[in-house]
Every structure is written in structure tokens, then in C-alpha cells.
Image: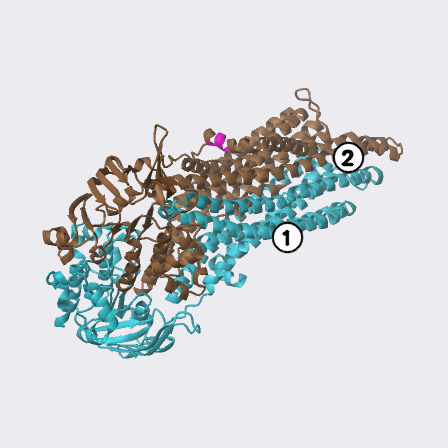
Chain colours: A brown, B cyan
Amino acid sequence: MPARRRKPEAGQTVMIKRGGPGGPRAVGKGAKLDPKTLKRLLGYIFKNYKLRFFFVFVCIIVNALAGVAASLFLQELIDGNITPLLEKKMQGQTIVSDDFIPLLWTIGRMALIYAAGIICAFLQQRLMVTISQGVQKSIRDEMFEKMQRLPISYFDRNTHGDIMSHYTNDIDTLRQMLSQSIPQAFSSLITIVSVFIAMCSLSLPLTGFVILSLFVMMLITGKITGKSGKYFIAQQSSIAEVNGYIEEMINGQKVVKVFNHEEPSKEAFDELNEELYVNAREANGFANTLGPINNNLGHLQYALIAVLGGALAIFRIDLLGQTLKIGGIASFLQLSRSFTMPINQIVQQFNFIIMALAGAKRIFALIDEEPETDEGYVTLVNAKKNANGEITESEERTGMWAWKHPHGTGEVSYTPLKGEVTMNDVDFGYVPEKIVLHNVTLYAEPGQKIAFVGSTGAGKTTITNLINRFYDIADGKIRYDGININKIKKDALRHSLGMVLQSTNLFTGTVMENIRYGKLDATDEEVYAAARLANADDFIRRLPKGYDTMLTENGAQLSQGQRQLIAIARAAIADPPVMILDEATSSIDTRTEEIVQKGMDGLMKGRTVFVIAHRLSTVKNSDVIMVLEKGRIIERGNHQKLISEKGRYYKLYTGAFELD
Amino acid sequence: MIKKLAKSIREFKTVSILTPVFMIGEVIMEVVIPLLMAKLVDDGINGNSGEGDMNVILVMGAALVVCCILSLFSGFAGARTGAKAAMGFARNLRKDMFYKIQGYSFSNIDKFSTASLVTRLTTDVTRVQDAYQMILRIAVRAPIMLIFSLIMAFLVNVELSLVFVAVIPILAIGLILIIKFAHPVFERVFKRYDDLNNVVQENVSGMRVVKSFVREDYEIRKFKTISGEIYKDFSFAEKVLAFNNPLMLLCAYGGMLVISWLGADLIVNQGTLTTGQLMSMTTYAMQILMNLMMLSMIFVMVTMSRASAERICEVLDEESDIKSPAGAPLTEVADGSIEFRNVSFEYKKGSGNYALSDINIRINSGETIGIIGGTGSSKSTLVQLIPRLYDVADGSVLVGGKDVREYDLETLRDAVAMVLQKNTLFSGTIKDNLQWGKLDATDEEMTEACRLAQADPFIQEFPDKYDTYIEQDGTNVSGGQKQRLCIARALMKKPKILILDDSTSAVDTATDSKIRKAFREEIPDTTKLIIAQRISSVMDADKILVLDGGKVVNFGTHDELMKSSPIYREVYESQQKGSESDEAVSAPVGKGGEA
């Protein structure tokens, strides 16, 4: 049955390879089974599928035993039934149909065993599908749920490609392992043990010989796996390089065109492509030879056993008290094949299991990441004023919001949501050793417009990221409506803050859905109103399907300015008392900005707004302008004041100093 | 489609043919080996009227060893050539696609998203490559093995072999049914996978948006809906596939039992079969069934990779719509004059959706032209017609007095340097990036270009100066620095026409005006087209073009436009507003009046 050995190889190719630099990662030569990860992974199975998994095991055992019985069947048939009949015939007796009854019994018994094997094989596969898919789903869901709870800093530390590959490559290898490798390895193990016992019962010396040849086989397999493993690793890094190059060049394809740079770009590609080819050829070439080599070693072993066994039987050499019969040799030959095959399978599965465990380890690392902590207890509730003018909680939306502040005494106080933000001597560093913001103090009264001006890296965005607690401050205090923001539940805090960022992220879905993202229960009318406010309504209506236009790939079909407008509308519909606009209008031309600005002015009315902008024209009319440099506020005041001070802002404004 | 892909086999044709040949060799040996084994058992172990014949055993054993070695050789060779053929094929496919993409025009590029081109070149090629290797090695092997095994079985015993004839159709029908049910579901699952990955990708890159709108739970629900569908579909498809193994076992075991029963009868009653032959028959039975399984698997694999092959073909089939003219194209651009004659343009041919219409402009060599207009007024579109990044729908664009379609593309684009709005720096040193403009540029030339683009001062501040390593897409330099590097890179070409498409938006006004001053003084003969948002960037130009809705609204000097163009005046005033009080301090940008 040589073909069967190729099954894992084929299974590997069927594996869904999506995204990420090509398929499963290669296993290093020194890769070891990681018992902790394995245990944890099996934990997922036992948690929900204990009974099923138990059944699967029973089925595997029955199926494996049926397989062993199948290879012994021939011996029983020949030695136990056919040979006696032949002997009877040779003695000149006539064979009547009654003589076939024992033979019929043997076949009948075998049919039962086979039937059990088939049923078990079927059950095992069906059950395993549920287990493997179920475990994948729970891991996938858990991973995504966990990811949503991770602090922003996690996304700073890890590249998007890496995070993505947990969902693609790592889960794929896991699928392979759960649905194929584990059951197969287990069934192989059972087969090996039972075949080994059967072989020993037939002939100990021949068994010894099988073990010896097995040893040789393993040695060769090890050598080849080592060689191909080396190339597989090289192949992986080649793939990563080629993918990286393709990505970079195709991204800049228009620049390539403009510069007539096609030829050099082809040359560089050829070089990387060639390297990948060589590594892939060697890696696969070696891996491919494993099958034929082991296969033929099996044949060789078969021939040698036949010769040896033949000699033993013909010369009637009784070794270790066993006498080998002819039928015994035939069975032994069958058994020897059944013995080496599962061992080879285990060797091949072992590679997959190690690869999958490495993937599982990466997945668990993500799941084990420290989530965003939220020790806040102040929440945001719909409020209304009762007859006495006191604020009370309301069930339905009232348009009025209040902070619900439970105190240690059991009392609950309500503070109306106003949008006052203060920062007191705030220090912050992305890493504790390196403080990037020093002694930042600011007061933003409700309805004020506060602007931040400064070079790239001066800390403008960082400040706004502290207000919504994307990061936690190292020292000092930030208060929102007089409440320390650490006491406010993060969800509530972020609900009360609107954000429009420089890099717009739109989601796959219609324009309508994208704007509604800011307020999930918004009516169509509200969406239109928000779009009008952001001056997006016009262009949206001119889109082929208006508000129902599907946006894909981050709104690739829209211009940067149009994407920006949708993002503004999305923030507008949420109607928060505090808005953070981080270079929100940088990609809109000044004329459009003028129009958006008008809408924004309406939007900003009655709101506290933090503005970060490159164009000074955008920030000029702010109540307070903060000039930041190297994490410190070096100037503050309104436009007139800063101009009259003739400091950094003045220089910037007059163009004597450049912002980078 | 197959023909198209087959073109990429090229130098790997020999190994592609050799692989199946070797596989056939291996198959023959694998069929012969059980035959020899049967002989060994019958004439050797059972020979000599049941007493065993050591000579026969030894001869047969030796023959077996030889066959094994032959089989080993062809198996080994087939493995190597198979890998070489498939990997080489993949290499050529990648190369052909990459080359093809290099030849794409802008409109070709617009058709595919970057992400999809990347997946086509990577994941899709890998899938086709795997399928190709499968086909070469196993798709040849399995049917041949099947046929040989059948022939051998018939040679051993015709009556018993009829069992196979009965079993094979049952198995085949079963397999077809399984594939028929499972395949569409698998296809759906793959699409769902794309959706799932898309959600993850959008969340990873938009995490700040998700968090600031407190939409974590919403996203989790969205994700779980899709992952639930995948679970459901995938479970269903795999459960259907779970019939595969039992079905095979059923046929195998059933066949074995029938063969055993009939075989026993033949041995005992008829005497037309030997026990050794019975053993071979069971071996053949297993082989036949195994190979049927392989065939079904290949079938699934190939259908799965078909989608990938189609996506690859789309890339290969896409013909660039802009090519150098046939015959003798012009290889010299006389000067930097530009003329638009009745030009209209649409991104989608025949859509009637004109991005530009009735454009008639004349620009003299060496002039500086400012272009102003709102988002969507087709400013970028207009200038992209000059280096023939797109072709006009109607009318003609002339450079140096000749229609751009008459020039050799490379000549034209060398003469017209363009700094794109969405510009990119590539990973490599500053020098590497500058050399894009001129491959053999000297250090002096680079410094000179950077001096003009006002990039030299900040480059000199970097510890590694011109050898500073730029990260992919220039993420380690500021926006303003990146724009100036891009301008310098364009200047390296020493072009006759220089186009800046909103290329100084992140540069401060003072530096911006220095760049323009340098242009005016040091490259006076170069025609300069400057698209800008800031009015200060264009008001000192020789002429200013005001675009609105794909039409030229006004074309004149700053002073003329202030009088004649309401749009221009509106933009001007909107940008001057609030600074009236300090008009004096914005003097460096206020030179327009002198022009």
C-alpha cells in the first residue's frame, strides 16, 4: 500500500493557505515537542468534548485492531482453513460443501470485525470534525475577543502581519494537527503496538530483524528531514523576502512607471525569485524523496524477511521455541508492512505536530497578553432632571448624559456630562524608562477649542491618546468633569470622546453602515444629518449607489479627502461632548476644508475640541494654542497672544521655522 | 487557461516530462514487486511440493532487491525532478506576472487592488504550484498504478478480478457524490475565510477607531457571526468528506472477503489458484483502492486550485493599454512645451463619465504653471496625461510639439519627471532612492538635486547622511522630508518638464518658497507644473490654471485671476483670512504681486 504514505503530504497541500508569507512555518532542526502547549491545547478538547473525545479514542482503537486483524486474517484463512482442506483433498477425500462451513465462519467473523472497524472509522471522523472545528472556533473567537481587549500598545509592539498570521497560518496548522495528526498518530501507535505483539507471537528472530531495519529507516529519515528542514527554513525566509519585495514594488508601482524603473525592479525581483526557487526546490526535493526511499526500504525488508523466513521454515530451524509455518511467513510479511507504515506516518505527523504546537504557542501568547485594565466604576447614563431640578437616571435616551458615581458609602451621585478636561502635571512614557511628555498641564473648559502645534514626535497625538486612555499616564492627574479619568469606566470615557484620526479606517460595508458605526441605533435621517454636517452628503449622493455604496479595502474607491469626510460624519453622529481631531482635515484641500470647517464649527459648538493640525490656518481661531516641543508645552495662549510674544509660534506662522 | 499557464513551464519542460516517466518507472516496479513476492512464496517457500526451495527464494529475493533499487532510483529521481518542475514553474509564473505588472499602465493598476495583486503573486501561485506537483507526480502515478494493478490482477485470475469491476463503480459513485456535496461548501468556506481575514485585518489596523467608538463587542459579534458560519460550513463539508474513509474501507474489506471466499473455493475445489496468488490478489485490491482514493483527492485539489489559476490568468491576460508606438517612435523630446488640444478623458472607456473635458491649453517651454482646484476637480488627472500615464479619450496632448503617443514611452517619461501625490520611497539608502532618477548618478549630482529640493540640509544632519537607510515607504522621515526627497529624486532625471502634484503640502511655507526660488533660478529651462492647495505655492507662477469639475475655468496670472476668477479669489481669500492683521509677516509668500 505504498500510496497511503503520501496522504499526509497531500493533506498538507489541501491546507488553506491564506495571507501571511506562505503557509506553515518551517520547523527548526532542534524543534522539540512542547508538553505545556500540548496540554493546554488538549485542554480545549477536554473542556467541551470530553465524551466525544473518549469515543473517538475507542473508535480509533477498534479501527486499528480491525486493521491488525485484517492482516492476520489471511494467515488464519490459509493456515486454518484452506491448507487443511487442501490436505484433505490431497489425501484423496472429497470435499463437500459442509467442509467449507469453518471457512465460512472465519469469513463471517471477519466480516463482523470489519464492520465494526468501518463503523468506528466513520464515527471517529464525524466526531473528530466537530471537535476539531469546534476547538478551532473557540480558539479563534477567544483570540479575537482577547485582541479587542488588548491595549493599543500591543498593536504598537506587533506588526499587523504578525497578528494576522495568528488567524491564518497558525490556525491552519492547528486544524491540520487536530483533524489529522493527532488521530493518525494515535491510531498508528495502537497499530504499532498490536502489530508488534502479533509479530512477536509469530517469530521473535524475524521481529528482531524488522526492528533492526526499522532503525536504519529512521536513521535515513532523520538525515533527510534534517536536510530538507534546513532548506525549508531558508525557503520561509525567501518567501518572506519575495513577498515583501512584491508588496513594496506593487505599492509603489506608479512611481516605478513614472521613473521608467521597470527594468531594475525586474532585475532585483529575479534575484530574489531565483533564491526562493532554489530553496523551495531543495526543500521539496528532499521531502519528496522520503516517500520512495522508505517505501522501497520496506520492499527490501520484505524481500529479506521472505528469504530469512523461508530459510527458517524450510530448514525448520526452531528459534526461541517458535516454529514458523508457511502461512506464518505470509502473515509476518503482511505484518511487517503494517508495522513500518504507521511508524513512517508517525514520523511525518510528528513534524506537523511540532509545527502546529509552535503555532499554538504563538496563539496562546496572544491570548495570555495582559488585557487593558479597567478599574473604573464611574459610568455614563442617560439622565433627566426631575421636578426639583435634580439629575436622575433615565431608562431611555434623553439626549442628556450624566456620570453615575457610586461612592464607598453606597450613595450614588450624578454629575452632568459637560466636557471639561484638565491635565495636571502629567508625565508619560511609552516605556517607563523613557518619558516623552513632561509636566503637561492644561485646562479645557466645556466648549473650548484647544489646539496642539509642534513637530512630528513632539507629543501632540500622545496627549490626546492619554485623554481617552489608550495609554496610562506615569504621573500626574487627568480629570474629566472633575472626575479622575482612572475612576471612569473606559467604555464610558470613550463614549464621551469623539475621535477623527489622520489615517482614516473605514470598514467593509456600505457608506451608511460606516457612518452609523458612530451610533449603532441611528436612524437613516440621523445618518443623513451627520453627513450633511460633515459636508459629505453631496459627494455620497453622487456615488453610484449613494449611501448604499459598498466600501471595500478601507474605501479604496474614494479619495483620501472623501474618506476623511466619512470619518468626520462618523464622529459627528456619535455626538460626544469632547472631540479630538488629529490632523482630521489634512488631506482635504483648503477650499473643501473651508466648507467642512463650517460644518465642523457647527459641530464644535458647545463641545470641547482638541485639534492637532499641520496647517496653522486650521488652529488659528482656537481658544488656546499649545506649542509643544520634545514633550513639553513651550508656549500657550491664543493666536494674538502667541504672535505678540514673537516666540516659536510666531516663527512658525511667519514661515521662519519649519515643522517636521 | 491551461494553455496560458503552460507557457510558464518553459525550461522546466524536460523535468516536467521526466517526472511522470520516472513515476511510471516506479509504478512498474511497484507492480512487479508483488508479482515477484508471490512467486517467492509460491515457488520458493511453498515450492518443492511444500518443502520450500531455497534456490528459488534466493533468486527471487535477488530479483526483488534489484527491482527495489530500480524503484528506489526512479522514485528518488521523480521526487527531485517533480520538485524542480513545480518550483521552477512557480518561479516562472511569479516572474511572468511580475514582468506583466511592470508593463501595466496606470489604468491597469487601478483595476486591481494592491492587496489582491500581492495575493495573486504569492498565495495563488503557491496553490497552483502545489497542484502542479500533485499532477506531475500523483496524478500520473495513480491512474497508471490503477490500470497496472488491474491488469496484473486479471493476469493472476480473471474470475477474482471481476470483483474489482463490481467494486470500482460503487466506489466511484460514492466519491463523486461526496465531492459533489462537499465541493460547493468548500468554495463557500474559502470565501468566508476571506471575509474573516478581512474583519481581522480591518480591526488590527483600525483598532484605535474600534476602541474610541467602544465597538469592541460589536466587532466581536461581527467576527463570531462569520466564524460561526465557517464552523457550520466547514463541519458540514468535512462531515461529508468523512464518508470517504469508511466507504473506502467498506469496499476494501468487502472486496477482500469476497475474494477470500471465492479464492478459497478456487484453490480447494478448482485448484486454479494458489495461496500465493491469493495473497497477491489482496495486495492488488488494496493498491487499486488506494489509487482510487488518490485520484479523488487530486480531483478535489485541482478544483480548489482552479480558482487560483483563474486569478493568475486575469493578471497575465490583462493587456497594457499604453505601449510605445509600433514602427519608429520618436526618441527625442525637442523642448518642454506642452499643449492640450480639445482633450477629454474618462477613467472607464465609454462610461460617458468625463473626468476632463474640452481642455485647451498651451504652455511654453520653461514656464512655471500653477494648478488650483478643489478635491475631484481632476488636477492630478490632467497632469498624468502628459507623461502618458493615461491616454486621452479624445483630442491630443503634445509635448515638444509632438503628440505624446508618437514618442517612445521611455523617452517621454525620462523627459517628464513627475512627483506623484501619493508618493513612495523605497526601502534602501537615500542614495538608492535618488538613483531611481538616474541609475549611474554621481554623489555631486545627488547633492545638487537635494540642494535644489531643499533636502540637503536635513540629510546632512543625519548621522549617515546620504547613506541613511530609509524604511519602506519612508516611515522614518517626516512627511515634509519625504516630499523633498521625492522632489530631489525627480530632479535627478534633469527633466524637460517637472510636475509636482501637491508635493509640498507637508513642507512649511518658507521652505516651499525656497524650493520654488531654486527652480526659478537654477532650472529656468525646465517647464514646471505645480499643483497645490496653498495659494502661496502657485501665486508667483507665470500662469495659474483653475480647474473645476474637469474643466478649465480660468488660465492667467495671479493678478488677472484675482480680477476674473471668483473661484480663485475665494480660495485666496479663505487662505488669507485671519492673517490680514499680520500681512507684513507673511511677506515671504507674498511675492505674487511682483510676477
**Extent of the magenta region:** A37-41
Mark 2 residue type: Ile
**In this rendering, do the residues under marks 2 and 1 share a single chain?**
no
Q: Residues within 10 Å of mark 2 (few under 14, many from 20)?
A: many
- Quarter-of-image position of residue B285: top right
- Locate residue A562 relative to residue A649 in the image: left or right: right
Task: Name the side, left or right, on which B577 lies relative to B121.
Answer: left
Q: Main secondary structure of the magenta part?
A: helix
Q: Nearer the viewer, residue A429 or A85?
A: A429
- The residue singled out by tag 1 in the image is B180
| Picture layout, residue A607 above or below residue B354 | above
Residue B467, relative to residue A592: is it above or below?
A: above
Residue at 24 percent of width and 58 percent of height: B483
Q: CA distance from mark 2 to mark 1?
A: 35 Å
A39 inside magenta stretch? yes
Where residue A190 sits: x, y (%)?
61, 30
Report the side of A302 relative to A287 (left or right).
right
Mark 2 chain:
A
Which of these two is toward me, A263 or A22? A22
| Residue B578 visible in this rendered orientation of the protein | yes
- Observer-side mark, 2 or 1, equals 1
Instruction: Point out residue A387 in the picture as x, y percentages from the top left corner.
Output: 37, 42
Residue A401 place in picture, x, y as percent: 36, 44
Give the image quarter of residue A79. top right
Quadrant occupied by the N terminus of chain A? top right
Identify the chain of the residue marked 1, using the numbered disc in the image. Answer: B
Residue for badge 2:
A107
Q: Position of residue A259 (x, y in %)?
A: 30, 64
Q: Above or below — where is A205 with respect to B155?
A: above
Q: Secondary structure at mark 2?
A: helix
Identify the element where label 1 is drawn.
Answer: helix
